Image (cartoon, rainbow, N blue to C red):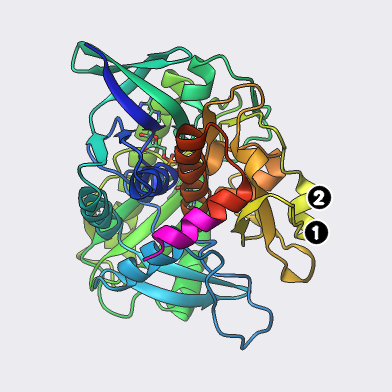
Amino acid sequence: MNEDFDVCVAGGGSAGLAAAIAAARVGARTLLVERHGSLGGMASAAFVHSVCGLYRLPAAKDAEAQMANDGFAAEFGRHLLGTRDADGPVRMGRVDVLLHRPAAFTRLADTLTRQESPNLSVRLHTEIAAADADTMTLACRGSFRRIRARAWVDATGDAVLATLRGAPCETESSDRLQRPAFIFALGGVAADTLGDDARLRLAGRLVLAVKAGALPDAILGAHFRASPQPGEAFVTIDLTGGTDFDPLDAACLSALETEGRDLGECLVEFLRAEVAGFAAAYVAAWPGRAGVRESRRVIGRYRIETADVAAGAEFPDTVAHSAWPMELRETASGPKLRFPAEGRNCGVPLRALRARDDESLFVAGRCLSCSHEAQASLRVIGTCLATGEAAGLAAALQVAHGACDAKGVLAARTQIAR
Ligand SMILES: Cc1cc2nc3c(=O)[nH]c(=O)nc-3n(C[C@H](O)[C@H](O)[C@H](O)COP(=O)(O)OP(=O)(O)OC[C@H]3O[C@@H](n4cnc5c(N)ncnc54)[C@H](O)[C@@H]3O)c2cc1C
């Protein structure tokens, strides 16, 4: 038996969460489908623990942090800061970020989605297996169910729904794709072990250990960040993904997971034995999945180009703003940052959130329509929350009125603001 919805959102990461809540708030009967057991995507399952792109790029060194987008992104940031598991805005050089524990992100997503019942139904442990123009087939534990909707939002990060519907997508060549990374949680870290100076000293120790052959090369770029909870830290290890890195291939993804855990275990053993402050350290949790920064992108009615982000372009149909430099991670040796001219934020036009030839398909988050370099800015969580909200509202307006435009999306955003 088919179930009918107005809007179906595929993927419950930051973009899908925002899209589903926004659509439900304007009265659309909405379904949110997620294959993991929790919402949040990379921000929960892959342990990404800082929200970037939530605040505008500061105009001056001592300028106060300002939200880059009104609406759900700002609301989500305020709620996160209301938990004891977040800290922000924290100025890091030329940017402001909000640090959080992924566990808090997950719980906040539970609370906010539950508040939108009965308009919003959430199906966890559900994989999108097939789709055509009007329906989607969902798989859960060997059973299949077809649902029908009048508009769709692809927030899968990998443009899964667009691919299944036959909408054109693009993928960067293997050697240029942003590199994946593995983030895990460390417990038992002594107080004051991860201050700025201590982290520099630790990086020096790791370099020497790699040079001496005591640790593998991949540990060189290991990055540590203390969590808001005492004794806890998150460790990020950038991976190469191999010469034929393919973030859409199961064998490649499987190799990332075991490589990440092998490296993490080896690093923790070294820290316990050799570095002050880590004698009692242990792996507190492995992530649900390794982190993938880039895979497919949908080809939309407008492709946000590298030059748009570099110049901080504005569009007549801007519905959100990106506020992060292009953070290129094409090698596993740390980021190359390219800031936009005069720190200007870049507009996200509604056309970049609409599939080129598919009237009822919208897209949000890291698979929206943009160039490879532009994605290096647009993919961050703060921007995903904002593009997700805009795509969800546009989809709901399309269902209600048979059309949608940026003016309507912005008016709806104001109407549902909390
Ligand atoms: C290692 C790493 C570090 C990063 N660091 C930062 C950072 O510090 N700050 C920051 O702001 N951003 C950071 N990012 C980027 C950011 O985390 C992601 O780009 C962002 O979270 C993407 O959100 P999304 O909603 O578009 O996609 P995702 O978070 O990937 O969510 C997509 C969701 O769709 C679900 N899904 C996919 N296919 C299906 C299917 N067939 N059926 C059902 N569900 C499906 C997935 O399970 C997932 O939950 C980092 C990314 C990585 C990988």
- Marks 2/1 in contact by CB < 8 Å: the verdict is yes
Residue 248 in sight: no
Q: Is residue 311 above or below residue 167?
A: below
- Compared across the picture, whether 186 is left or right of 409 comes to left
Q: Is residue 108 above or below residue 246?
A: below
| Residue 251 shown in magenta | no
The residue shown at (44%, 39%) is: 396
State the mark number for residue 293: none
Q: Which residue is mark 2?
A: 307
Label 1 CB sits under 8 Å from any ligand 1 atom: no
Q: Is residue 418 above or below residue 218?
A: below
The residue shown at (44%, 33%) is: 156
Label 2 CB sits under 8 Å from any ligand 1 atom: no
Q: Quadrant of the N terminus?
A: top left
> Looking at the picture, how far across and down is residue 15, in whole percent?
45, 45
> Looking at the picture, how far across and down is residue 7, in whole percent?
39, 32
- Front one among 400 and 33: 400
Q: Which residue is mark 1?
A: 311
- Front one among 244 and 4: 4
